[in-house]
Amino acid sequence: MDDVAIEVSGTGGGSPDALVLVLAEDDSTPRSDGELEQQLRGLAEDGELRGELGRTVVLHTDGGSTARRVVVAGIGKRAEVDADAVRTAAAAVARRLRDVGGTLGWTLDDSLPLSLAEQARAVIEGAVLGAYSPGRWKTEERGGKPIGKIVLYGGDNGVGDTAGRAATVSKWVNWARDLANSPPNELTPEGLAKRAVDLAGSNLQVTALDPQQIDELGMGALSAVGRASVNGPRLIVLRYEPPRAKRDAVIGLVGKAITFDAGGISLKPALKMYDMKGDMAGGAAVIAGTAAAAELELPVRILTVVAAAENLVSGDSFRPGDILRAANGKTIEITNTDAEGRLVLADALWYARKEGATHVLDFATLTGAMEVALGDLYAGLFANDDAWRDDILAAAQTSGDHTWPFPLHRRYRRYVDSSYADMKNSSELRQAGAVLAAEFLKEFSGEGPWGHIDMAGPGFLERSRGDYYTQRGGTGYGVRLIVELARRLGA
């Protein structure tokens, strides 16, 4: 249902295939009238209607409503209702109706502690993201019937504009999920570059540098990580130029795209190594986020740089003990080949600054330490500029891509000190692993505001998250954040 149509109606009229009424735990029945109200009251008296978050009850109306069926969707305790609660309820409805499809009507509730526009955005995101299936490689996938249209009752033109943007962005979130879920034999660095190049249009230019061009630029870090594979590395560059940008700022988005990470000579354990196809989720996010901004024609320039490589083992693998020279001239002692993400980002960050990015933000499934700290809900944020950090956090809070700030401090620099080179890429100390990675990247972030989002937890899920992300695999984390950040900077 990525191409769902959106309609806004000021009243509850019309004849949708299913009409959704939300129910809080504090209430006995949802808002309704006439014969439908009596039917709902009867269900409540029988104990079938309860407002627990994510719970749904389907009522076949038999003429008691203009809709063929009514879905009562639980949203939890009224005082605790936020956008995520509405997204979760909408996702539960979309999954409940996957065998029905058709037109979905949703009654916005002005008594909730969310504006109607916020509700509308959450409804669309929850329904589109909740209906996603990762099984498109199944030969007999039972796809169900998509919801082709969502009618929002009780809104106005502003609600419609918000809902339309949410539908566009959600489509690109699911596109990024498809990339992260793609098998590594299908999505190589070259394959990812081709997918990006296919997005080029009148306001979006896309190029991809091959291994020879990467070497010519002196990108010794990216080149070393990718050289063990027959599928050589790529540096993918997207340039979004709106007709009229409102500011001189150029957002530089940088993404880690390790299309498969075996760990190199510092080989990963075999258990769940198959999920390492998702180590390119940061790269997928920045590509999809840029494409979404271009489709929405947001008035801010974006330069996106994605470092794509496979980290494998061969006779040409880079080794622990090697010293690499990155594109900015700094040398790196390799102490762990499985700390490769920061290496490819180092050269990509340099390139983004060289090409004119004024405000840089990188996305990467970078450290297990961050996943241990924050689990699968929040990503960690590091920044060298307080104002830029606050802009990112505000965009994260609104978008639903949750982010939490972590510290940078000059005395953490000792974690990456090397006796032989300018720095090393990992530490034997089991301390501040995510901070170590951020301090390493800071050495390549150049002059100007820079932020780093470590999305190891929410970028690729091992299991249902218990909300509107119930499928394992890629989440498209970062796409919504990027669009919201670009929208704010272009305002």
Image (spheres, rainbow, N blue to C red):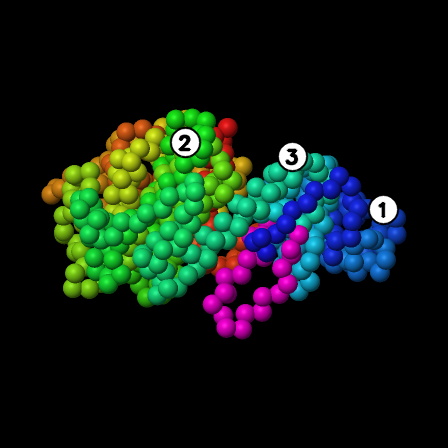
Describe the element under mark 2 as helix, strand or loop: helix
Question: What predominant SS class does the magenta segment belong to?
Answer: loop
Give the labeled residue for mark 3: 158
Measured as percent of width and height from the top left, residue 29 is found at 79, 48
Secondary-structure class at tag 1: loop
* Residue tagged 2: 389
Lower position in the chain sequence, tag 3 or tag 1: 1
What residue lies at 58% left-to-right and 53% top-to-bottom? 3
Give the distance between the C-alpha atoms of the residues marked 2 and 3, in whole angstroms: 29 Å
Disc 3 secondary structure class: helix
Residue at 33%, 60% (x, y): give it: 188
Image: 56 above or below 136:
above
Within 10 Å of disc 2 (Cα), the crowding (few <14, some 14-19, many 20+) is many
Q: Choose the circle earlier in sequence order: 2 or 3.
A: 3
Cα distance, mark 2 to mark 1?
A: 48 Å
Comes first in the chain, label 2 or label 1: 1
Which dot, 3 or 1, sits closer to the camera? 3
Q: Residues within 10 Å of mark 3 (few under 14, many from 20)?
A: few
Residue 137 part of the magenta-drawn span: yes
Disc 2 marks a residue whose amino acid type is Arg
Question: Is 141 situated left or right of 13 in this image?
Answer: left
Q: Could one spot residue 269 in this view of the protein? A: yes
Amino acid under disc 3:
Gly
Q: Which residue is mark 1?
A: 33
Q: Position of residue 353 (x, y in %)?
A: 29, 35
Between 76 and 215, the one lying in front of the other is 215
Contact (Cβ within 8 Å) of mark 2 with mark 1: no
Q: Residue furthest front?
A: 202
Per the rendered image, the range of residues in magenta is 126-149
Q: Residue at x 33, y 33 (%)?
A: 357
